[in-house]
Amino acid sequence: METPAPADESHASQLRLLLEELCCDLCRFEHIAADGLLPENIHITREYHLGAPGVFADIRVAPGDLPPYFVEIKFGYSTEAVLKHLRRKYKNEAAVSPHGSKIILVIDAENRPEWPNAEAELRKHLPPGLELQVWDGRRLLGMLRERFGVEVEAITAENLLDVRQTIDQAKGFHAFGGESLAEYEHDPLNAALTWHFGFWRLRQLREPKQKTPREIFPPGTYRGVVVLFCDLCSFSSYVRDTPDNEIIRESLTSFYSKARYQIINSGGMLYQFVGDEVIAFYGIPDRREDAVRAALATARALVSIGNSVSNHWQRRIDRVQTSGGVHLGMSIGDLQIVSLQPFSRTHVGAIGDCINVAARLMAVAGSSEIAVTNSLYEAVDDETQARFREVEPVEARNVGRIKAWKLNLAEG
């Protein structure tokens, strides 16, 4: 196993991003198999804000009633950089301790002769009660072998692409069932559904009436859908002031990957990405009672993801940007889901005034703010309502003036 050289930082960054995805899936399946937890009761957050400005854990896992913990992916960083990052992130006991009981550090330790001393030094600087577990490459490969039956000799981007395909097949089997994992076929429709929805959510939708994949999300009218629009702030300015196009691509891939994961793993539907925007639906195809709550929780997580992506991007360019993070808009209403090809369920589109309204509301929200319609505001609990403030009506093209409310998610 080789640690990427500094000149290959772009490759290393993409490798770490892929490892983040795989470790999220590995942690979820580990708790399903070892602890008997339901997938929907395992809450995984990417870029979890640790309280101080610009300080985020790579991953936080909250497995049901078990103690939550953090996961840090540090493949390819120098040992000095690893120690510096982790000391900075976890030095504040008051901010960290209520949110996690341990850190799982995923690192290529076997390639570092100095690692035993470095690990001992790191342990000395962690707050009391915060345990450290190290997953080196050998342990990670062993867990993948045990949990998914994947035989991989080394941690490389090429090998992990095969691993991800195997995990996608395992998630598809969990979602759609079948005689056995070996006989399960992850066909284009199944792959499309697992792109839009979490695998556990698909199983919830399929099992009660033993639906086929084609019956899970048919075209038609869906009532009371929560629409969430999220957009990177000052995106054009960041692009203009970034001379290296690779940085632009890496930053967008990071945002796309983390935003999608957060949406589908909170029970939502990822509809699509449009440039630097992401559009999600909640309460579809069935009207879940917790749709508004889940959408607001996702909005809060997307704020952390947006701030983390912007902070990382800013550190790699010269010109200081006037704003960063994301701004969001939310509405609730009826959607028409239509096939984009005759008799096809693989590719679908959505139309409805609530989409246009959410987009207009997003345009008036500032960094870390969410603007919502009055009907959505009325659907939240009293405690949440108290944190909103009413704003001037918003002109939504061809729809009318919308009574709207704002919430600054950076303040809670």
Image (spheres, helix red, strand yellow):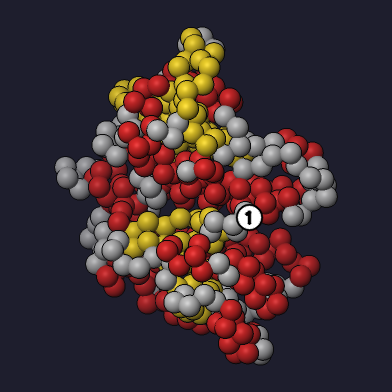
Q: Is residue 162 visible?
A: no
For disc 1, the marked residue is: 54
Position in image of residue 339 (x %, y %): 40, 28
The vertical placement of 339 against 37, above or below, is: above
Q: Count numbered badges in the picture.
A: 1
Question: Residue placed at 47% from the left, 15% from the top?
Answer: 402
Q: Is residue 317 left or right of residue 353?
A: right
The vertical placement of 80 against 390, above or below, is: below
Question: Residue placed at 35% from the left, 45% from the top?
Answer: 267
Position in image of residue 330 (x %, y %): 45, 29
Question: Residue placed at 76% from the left, 54% from the top?
Answer: 316
Q: Is residue 1 left or right of residue 387?
A: right
The vertical placement of 76 against 42, above or below, is: below
Q: Is residue 57 left or right of residue 28?
A: right
Position in image of residue 22 (x %, y %): 48, 64
Q: Is residue 241 visible?
A: yes
Q: Is residue 370 left or right of residue 75?
A: left
Q: Residues within 10 Å of mark 1 (few under 14, many from 20)?
A: some
Quarter of the picture containing the N terminus is: bottom right
Amino acid type shown at disc 1: Gly
Q: Secondary structure at mark 1?
A: loop
Position in image of residue 366 (x %, y %): 60, 32
